[in-house]
Amino acid sequence: MTEKTLETVSNIYEAFVNAQKAFNPAIKNAENSFYKKNGKGSAYVDLAGCYQAIMTALHDNDIAVIQKTHDCEHGVKVETVFLHKSGTDFSAGVFYMPLAKQDPHGYMGALTYARRGSLMAACGLAPEDDDGNSAMSEEQKTERQNESLVNKMESSKVTSIKKPGA
């Protein structure tokens, strides 16, 4: 690798690290009504939510992202590639998603799943819980934890305490 190439490659790596530090959490923003628990669909972050979590940080660091598809007979393959203004790029590898059904809906569903999975893996995104904790201050979180602990203690039915050896 020439010195120029090494310098150029280090530019995209440095820019990506800086971008990753500024990624927003991937907030679960959609509901899958197919998988219901207690009458409610399971929450997940959709593809748009994944992009929303990363795009500003990537663009602020002069990085664009593209997702290329690759030929695949029994599924969908997606490759997430990051492009830097220096002209360098790097690939996060190819992500494979098998087809559930071999029809247009099956392909598009697999493509969406593959794009989301590839992007999340490439960026190190993990969906954040959507229980409101991210909107609470640290003081509110501590208060909520303390209330929970007090409720647990009040609901326990301790009637007596014996000393060891007594």
Image (cartoon, grey):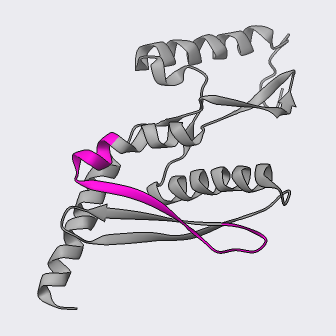
**Camera sees residue 18:** yes
Give me the residue at 74% from left, 8% from top.
154
**Camera sees residue 17:** no
In the rendered image, the quadrant that contains the C terminus is top right
In the rendered structure, does residue 118 fall within the stretch colored magenta? no
In the rendered image, the quadrant that contains the N terminus is bottom left
**128 left or right, relative to 51:** right
- Residue 149 image-quadrant placement: top right
Give me the residue at 85% from left, 12% from top.
157
**79 left or right, relative to 96:** left
Instruction: Write down the region rendered in magenta.
Output: 56-76
Give me the residue at 25% from left, 52% from top.
18
Looking at the image, which is closer to me, 71 or 113?
Answer: 71
- Residue 69 image-quadrant placement: bottom right
The x and y percentages for residue 21 are 31, 47
Compared to residue 144, the image places residue 65 above or below, namely: below
Give me the residue at 58% from left, 50% from top.
116
Looking at the image, which is closer to me, 32 or 145?
Answer: 32
